[in-house]
Image (spheres, rainbow, N blue to C red):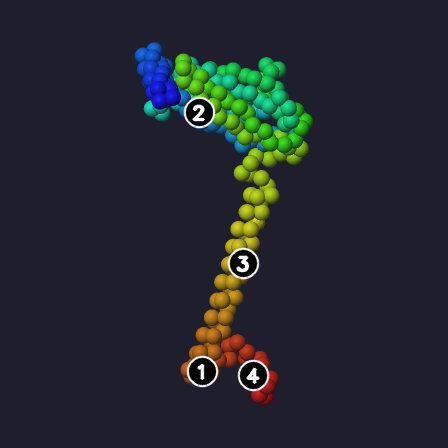
Amino acid sequence: MFLRPVIQTFVTLLTATLAFAAGDPAILAIRIAEGDDAVYATGSRATRGLTVLITDETGHPVDGATVSFVLPAAGPSGLFSSGSRTEIAITHSDGRAAVWGMRWNRTAGPFEVRITAVKGEARAGTVSAQALSDSPVAKGAAPTKSSVGRGGHKLLWISVILAGAAAAGAAGLVAGKTTTGAGASPTAALQIGTPTITLSHP
C-alpha cells in the first residue's frame, strides 16, 4: 500500500519528462475565450460560435492540440455543422480552436458543452454554459436588466436635479428672510410680494 503512491508519482514524473523530451506540454489548461454563457433562439443557427484557448504549464499557447466539443445527447442541444453532436478542432499557433454554425433544437433551457483538449500525454477538460430560449437575449445585456438600469439612472438624475432645485429655492427663501430681518432696504424686501403688500396696505 505504501509503494502505490510512490509508483504513481514516479509514473507521473516519467510521463512529464517524456512529454517534455518529445516537445509536448506536461500540463494543459483550457480557457473559454469567446461564446461562453451565450443564449440562442430555439431552432436557430449559432453565428458567434465557441472559441477556446489552450495553454501549457508556462501559460504559452499550445499549437496542434486536439480539442473536442460535445453537445448533450438529450434536452436542449443541437448538432454541429457536420451533423454530429461531437466536433473536433485543432489549435493553431495562437493556441485557439473554435466551432460555430451549430443548429440548435427547439427545446428551451440551459445546457453545457463538454470540451476536452489533448496534446501528447497531457489532457484537460472543462464545460461551457449555454442556453436555448424562445425569446433569447445575450446574458449580461438583457433588456429587463440594462433597460431598467438605464431608466433607473435617468430617474435618479432627475430626482437629484429636482432635489437640487428645491434646495436652491429653499435656500433663496431663507436668504431673503434673513436679509429682511437684518434691516435690508425696502426694495429688496418687496421684491417677492410687492402686489400683496400694496393691496393689504392701501
Give the mark, 4 or 1, whose residue is nearer the N terminus.
Answer: 1
The three-letter code of the residue at mark 2 reads Ile
The three-letter code of the residue at mark 4 reads Ile
Circles 3 and 4, Cβ within 8 Å, touching? The answer is: no
Residue 16's image quarter? top left
Taking the spot 58% from the left edge, 47% from the top edge, the residue there is: 148
User: 198 above or below 19?
Assistant: below
Q: Which mark is residue 197?
A: 4
The residues tagged by marks 2 and 4 sit, at their Cα atoms, a distance apart of: 82 Å
Residue for badge 3: 159
Q: Could you classify mark 2 by the number of other residues whose Cα lies within 10 Å: few (under 14), some (14-19), or many (20 or more)?
A: many
Q: Which sits in the foreground, 152 or 140?
A: 140
Q: Which sits in the foreground, 141 or 185?
A: 141
Q: Which mark is residue 181?
A: 1
Circles 2 and 3, Cβ within 8 Å, touching? The answer is: no
Q: Kindly tell me whether residue 91 is visible in this rendering.
A: no
Taking the spot 63% from the left edge, 32% from the top edge, the residue there is: 109
Residue 110 location in percent, x, y?
A: 60, 31
Q: Is residue 81 rendered to the left or right of residue 23?
A: right
Give the mark, 2 or 3, whose residue is nearer the N terminus.
Answer: 2
Give the mark, 1 or 2, whose residue is nearer the N terminus.
Answer: 2
Q: Is mark 3 on a helix, strand or loop?
A: helix
Give the mark, 1 or 3, whose residue is nearer the N terminus.
Answer: 3
The three-letter code of the residue at mark 3 reads Ser
The three-letter code of the residue at mark 1 reads Gly
Q: Which residue lies furthest to the top in this view?
A: 22
Nearest to the eye among marks 2 and 4: give it: 2
Residue 132 location in percent, x, y?
A: 62, 30
Circles 1 and 3, Cβ within 8 Å, touching? The answer is: no
Q: Which mark is residue 30?
A: 2
